[in-house]
Image: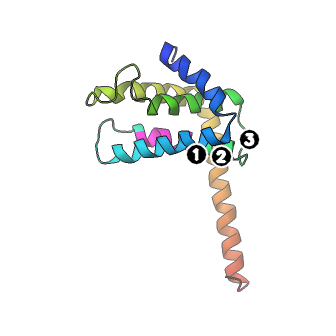
Amino acid sequence: METPLFEKSTSRAERVMQNPGRVQKLIASVIRKSASLKSTAMVPGLLEKIQPLVRMVKSYASKEYREVPWQTIVLSAAALIYFVAPFDAIADFIPILGFADDLAIVSAVLASISQDVDSFTAWEKKKREVAEHAEFTEIDNGQQ
């Protein structure tokens, strides 16, 4: 993960994460790029790997989930910034190879923060279960 381009993404991520508007722009860029790649099978697994990073960064920015180290959020945002950058170590317009470096960076970040991502996804699961329970309680009480 110690590449000059990723280091640049990391310093940019620190600034982005301090500005909710910039976080929203980053998330929107990731979603746009992901949507454009869904129809192509450029690098299998890349889109699935970035999804928890997107959700965690978004939840952190909205102050919904804060039980994660700042460094984890910065690394997550840096990986997303690297993903949306068209000219990184291998330019994304080069078929297949263009996304290999993105996959390598995202995979390395996920490996280094796996416990934090696991905690986040467990929190998401619990949150869904609580919401479903509340929904069923409303139905049982005739309040829909």
* Cα gap from disc 1 to disc 2, whole angstroms: 6 Å
Q: Nearer the viewer, residue 84 or 67?
A: 84
In percent of width and height, residue 24 lies at: 59, 44
Image quadrant containing the C terminus: bottom right
Q: Please name the amino acid that badge 3 sits on.
A: Arg
In percent of width and height, residue 56 lies at 61, 42
Label 1 Cα neighbours within 10 Å, binned few <14 / some 14-19 / many ≥20: some
- Give percent across and percent down for residue 84: 45, 34
Q: Amino acid at mark 1?
A: Arg
Q: Secondary structure at mark 2?
A: helix
Marked residue nearer the N-terminal end (3 or 1): 1
Callout 1–callout 2 Cβ contact below 8 Å: yes
Q: Residues within 10 Å of mark 3 (few under 14, many from 20)?
A: some
Find residue 116 and name its label. none
Residue of label 1: 55
In the picture of the structure, the residue carrying the numbered disc 3 is 66
Please give the residue where the numbered disc 2 appears in the rendered image: 59
